[in-house]
Image (cartoon, rainbow, N blue to C red):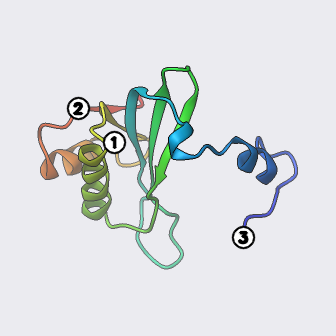
Amino acid sequence: MLEDVEGALWSRDMIEDSRRLKDRVPPFSRIVVAIDPAITVSEDSDETGIVVAGLGVDNHGYVLEDASGKFAPAEGARQAVALYHRYDADRIIAEVNQGGAMVESTIRAIDPNVAYRSDC
């Protein structure tokens, strides 16, 4: 259960009020898989953030799936590439403030043909 944090951008109520049933979501003009890899893999490590997000034809953003977890680099890359194909995404976008070129090379080792862009 998540608790609200003072000063957070969104409260739990705001998130719940914004949820849409699948039959109420518009078509998407763009879908991306975003990955923010953790730099270590241990019990105390941060999760690797992996989300699928879409831009609706209504110009609203939608989080379609949160697949974050504790992954070794190759595992996280496999997860991101699998989501890219499952959602027929336009691109994988990666946060590369830590790991830099390793993130792209790990993703490309899984599938050299994915559309990829780093945040820098």
Position of 46 compared to 102: left or right? right
Residue bearing mark 1: 100
Q: Earlier in the sequence, mark 2 or mark 1?
A: 1
Q: Amino acid at mark 2?
A: Ala
Q: Residues within 10 Å of mark 1 (few under 14, many from 20)?
A: some
Of badges 2 and 1, the one in the foreground is 2
Residue bearing mark 2: 115
Q: Are marks 3 and 1 in contact (CB under 8 Å)?
A: no
User: Quadrant of residue 73 in the image?
Assistant: bottom left
Q: Residue 101 placed where, x, y %?
A: 27, 41
Seen as rendered, the residue at the extreme front is: 23
Q: What's the distance in space between the residues labelled 3 and 2, CA to CA?
A: 35 Å
Q: Amino acid at mark 1?
A: Gly
Task: In the rendered structure, find residue 21 and report the number of the disc placed on it.
Answer: none
Helix, strand or loop status at disc 2? loop
Residue bearing mark 3: 1
Q: What's the distance in space between the residues labelled 2 and 1, CA to CA?
A: 17 Å
Seen as rendered, the residue at the extreme right is: 6
**Picture layout, residue 7 above or below residue 40:** above
Indicate the quadrant containing the C terminus: top left, top right, bottom left or bottom right.
top left
**Picture layout, residue 104 above or below residue 67:** above
Q: Earlier in the sequence, mark 3 or mark 1?
A: 3
Helix, strand or loop status at disc 1? loop
Q: Residue 106 placed where, x, y %?
A: 21, 51
Position of 116 compared to 50: left or right? left
Q: Residue 12 placed where, x, y %?
A: 77, 53
Q: Amino acid at mark 3?
A: Met
